[in-house]
Image (cartoon, helix red, strand yellow):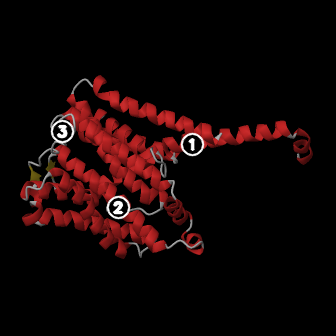
Amino acid sequence: MTGSMTTANRLLMAGALLLALLFPLAAPNDYYLYVMSLAYIVAISATGLNLILGYTGQLNLAHAGFMAVGAYTVGILTVDFGVPYWVAFVLSGVVTAAVAVTLGLVSLRLKTHYFVIFTLCVGFILYLVIEKFDGLTHGTVGVIGIPAPTPLPTPFGPIRFDTPLSQYYLVLVFLALALWVMNRIVRSLLGRAFMAVRNSEDLAEALGVDLMRTKLLSFVLSTVYAGFAGGLYAGFVRFLGPGMALESHTFEQVAFILVGGLGTLYGPLLGAVAMTWLTQSLQFLQDFRMIVFGPMLILLVMYLPQGVIGLVNERRAKRAAAEKAKQTTAVNPTEVRANA
């Protein structure tokens, strides 16, 4: 049964990838490509947040601030210092990781709601630094005129990323890479250590898991995802403002994870795509769209607390258990009746 489920999952993901590749052919105009590309970028960041929240059990409310760190790294280096985009993009992950290590060594000594409150303060501090440090971040004016990703040389000629279609496929490639890497992480011994910390820190420590090192590694890896997502965002939108570091954007990503499925690989992607398009479809309501959006999200969390993918996985597990029980009954019905 496990093998067939794995095969089914692979076929499902292959079908989803095929639909993503063919999406531009069905898109009526470039606006649809723009919205879907933004959903993919946020999905990359939410995938990182899901690592520390869904797999390690730590809620980092400064996640949007780390995404802003990555974005501003690309924006400042390319606009003010003329650094090529791809060099700045790599540095966006490096700088974000360096900031995360520094803050993680302090914040991860706290537990439960103390850690959450600390990261909330960290996120607000990052926002204030971006807004007030005019000499570096351009303050409230923001970083304007960020260049698009520079062409990549190939044997068939350079690939340019100056059109919505080319940028859509660029973001899609990074999304697929991010999900593949995350899949490798969560299925490794390191991923099992993350889940052990989530389930019980005391038990994990008794089993030999180094709590501080494990939580710090999860924290840094999750923020690196946010940093690279911010780097892609900077090259895609080409304008940055301090508002992207606000904690409200972190709460949006948490909502994406809850809708798709907490602690599942593809939950953040499903939630990001679904909620982004739902938000866009309610734009005609302007500020009143939250009157519809808010209750819908509350009802979804109340009646689907495990998320869409979590619900599917739960039903699969029940079906597998029922089939196993039937097989046991068919193999040894006498013993089953005697036990009854």
Q: Nearer the viewer, residue 279 or 322?
A: 322
Of pointers 1 and 3, the one earlier in the residue sequence: 3
Q: Nearer the viewer, mark 3 or mark 2?
A: 3
Which residue is pictured at 16% across the width and 54% down the height?
A: 241
Cα separation, mark 2 vs mark 1, equals 27 Å
The answer to whether one can see residue 295 in this image is no
Q: Residues within 10 Å of mark 1 (few under 14, many from 20)?
A: some
Residue placed under numbered mark 1 in the picture:
313
- Image location of residue 27, percent across then percent down: 28, 25
Q: Nearer the viewer, mark 2 or mark 1?
A: 1
- Image location of residue 196, percent across then percent down: 55, 64
Q: Nearer the viewer, residue 183 or 275?
A: 183
Of pointers 2 and 1, the one earlier in the residue sequence: 2
The answer to whether one can see residue 120 in this image is yes
Instruction: State which quarter of the image contains the C terminus.
Output: top right
Which numbered marker is on residue 61?
2
